[in-house]
Image (cartoon, rainbow, N blue to C red):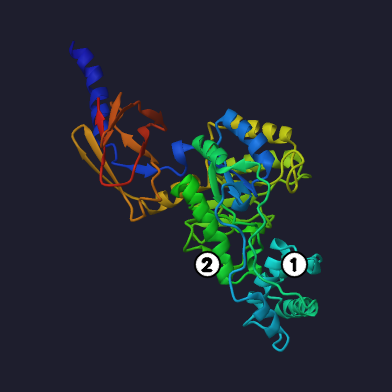
């Protein structure tokens, strides 16, 4: 017996010392459920096959998506495109004596956009609003001033009376009731303006009408959670437009204001790599001629560098811009599904929520006997930032089972072991209620 005690005592003493010296440590994991990367599947413009073909594939695989929609094409919409400003003839008459300059150019381009794209004025059938908008975005003002003077002169010479009239109601293929059903399976519907204008060619009043009237229809029909994300059409990065949208939408796909991002936009061919930034926000837009091998490589690269990969799709199966075959969509999503143990597939809204919550949440720990208390707190708006975060907390090696309690939530956890450390991984909500981990 003495010999047995002599053998066991050092082992037991070592285990006791080891367990008693477990550091009090917890971390909020970079991605939900401890995944290695995040992929977000987004769609622009709301073309029919996104709903008819892509959503069934995603629902089958259990993937949520974010759909940036133009609300004027949804049945039951209240708000329609218009021109916000002075009477059109006042603007045209003024243009006869006052050349276009920095003080009046945006009012005039807003008017031209309305007549060209909403009223479809035959006199403006050759006007390219994307060219005007991109020129303004790049500061090519003199060229725009000249174009606008020519257009205003052309309109004035027609001797027609131009005015704002009710928008023509399009033929609807989907209604808000349809979108409610899609939203109920986890999909996000987000603001892409009422009618897809190039916002760089609009003044402030018309930018805000196009975005906020779109937001109003989203909220009235789908609820607040579908008003948080916006994407200005054509993927623009115009500083003037961004500064108007940043305070009005928590999540903007065009360009993120957060300094914790290394941001690689669709127009940038830079590949992710090691960076001092906490997160890499990498946008890729598969086009009809994008090699499938390149699409899968984006996923693999994201896993290698812990990236948030934001994929931007448009047309599918012949409907919409740069349409991809439905078979390609299915194969691609199946490829992502095969790596689901490493990839968190999340809506744009939820991925951004998680990241901001993690960055802004502080943890405090205390231990009493066989209980560990973890408090999470941040100053974010709880109406918006309401996702649970995934935590990893070290526990003693002799904790075979752990009870988690936060408020009314009680669950049992089984510790994992890695590199000689025992820990539990769990979800918890920041707020007043602490997480209590108790050895069972």
Q: Is residue 352 above or below residue 110?
A: above
Q: Residue at x 53, y 36 (%)?
A: 181
Say what secondary structure mark 1 lies in. Answer: helix
Q: Position of residue 374 (x, y in %)?
A: 28, 42
Q: Is residue 138 left or right of residue 345?
A: right
Q: Position of residue 371 (x, y in %)?
A: 22, 34
Q: Residue at x 73, y 66 (%)?
A: 116
119 and 151: which is toward the camera: 119
Q: Residue at x 71, y 71 (%)?
A: 135
219 and 278: which is toward the camera: 219
Residue 135: in sight, yes or no? yes
Q: Position of residue 54 (x, y in %)?
A: 65, 36
Query: Which of the 4 image quadrants contains residue 334?
Result: top right
Q: Which residue is mark 2?
A: 244
Q: Is residue 212 left or right of residue 163?
A: left
Q: Quadrant of the N terminus?
A: top left
Q: Quadrant of the C terminus?
A: top left
Residue 277: in sight, yes or no? no
Query: Which of the 4 image quadrants contains residue 192?
Result: bottom right
Quick one: label 1, few (<14), some, or many (20+) residues within 10 Å? few
Query: Which of the 4 image quadrants contains residue 345?
Result: top right
Say what secondary structure mark 2 lies in. Answer: helix
- Of mark 1 and mark 2, the one earlier in the sequence is 1
Q: Which residue is mark 1?
A: 131
**Disc 1/disc 2 C-alpha distance (Å):** 22 Å
């Amino acid at each position: 017996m003495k010999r047995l005690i002599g053998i066991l005592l050092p082992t037991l003493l070592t285990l006791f010392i080891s367990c008693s010296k477990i550091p009090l440590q917890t971390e909020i994991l970079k991605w939900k459920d401890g995944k290695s990367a995040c992929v977000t599947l987004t769609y622009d413009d709301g073309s029919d096959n996104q709903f008819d073909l892509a959503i069934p594939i995603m629902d089958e695989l259990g993937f949520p998506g974010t759909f940036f929609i133009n609300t004027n094409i949804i049945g039951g919409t209240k708000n329609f495109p218009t021109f916000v400003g002075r009477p059109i003839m006042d603007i045209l008459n003024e243009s006869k004596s006052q050349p276009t300059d920095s003080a009046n150019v945006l009012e005039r381009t807003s008017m031209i956009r309305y007549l060209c794209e909403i009223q479809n004025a035959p006199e403006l059938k050759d006007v390219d609003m994307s060219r005007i908008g991109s020129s303004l975005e790049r500061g090519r003002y003199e060229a725009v001033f000249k174009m606008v003077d020519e257009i205003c002169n052309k309109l004035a010479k027609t001797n027609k009376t131009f005015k704002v009239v009710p928008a023509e109601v399009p033929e609807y293929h989907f209604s808000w009731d349809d979108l409610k059903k899609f939203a109920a399976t986890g999909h996000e519907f987000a603001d892409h303006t009422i009618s897809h204008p190039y916002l760089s060619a609009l003044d402030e009043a018309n930018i805000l009408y196009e975005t906020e009237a779109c937001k109003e229809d989203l909220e009235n029909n789908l609820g607040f959670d579908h008003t948080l994300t916006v994407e200005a059409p054509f993927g623009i990065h115009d500083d003037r437009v961004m500064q108007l949208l940043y305070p009005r939408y928590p999540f903007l796909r065009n360009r993120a204001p957060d300094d914790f991002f290394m941001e690689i936009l669709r127009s940038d061919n830079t590949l992710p790599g090691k960076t001092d930034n906490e997160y890499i926000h990498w946008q890729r837009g598969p086009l009809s001629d994008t090699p499938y091998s390149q699409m899968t490589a984006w996923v693999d690269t994201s896993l290698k560098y812990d990236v948030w990969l934001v994929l931007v799709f448009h047309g599918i199966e012949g409907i919409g811009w740069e349409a991809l075959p439905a078979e390609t969509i299915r194969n691609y999503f199946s490829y992502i599904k095969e790596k689901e143990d490493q990839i968190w597939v999340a809506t744009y809204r939820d991925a951004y929520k998680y990241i901001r919550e993690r960055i802004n949440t502080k943890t405090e720990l205390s231990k009493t006997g066989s209980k560990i208390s973890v408090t999470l707190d941040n100053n974010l708006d709880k109406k918006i930032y309401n996702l649970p975060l995934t935590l990893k907390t070290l526990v003693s090696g002799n904790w075979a089972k752990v009870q988690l309690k936060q408020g009314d939530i009680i669950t049992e956890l089984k510790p994992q072991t890695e590199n000689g450390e025992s820990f539990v991984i769990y979800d918890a909500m920041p707020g007043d209620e602490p997480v209590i981990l108790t050895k069972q």
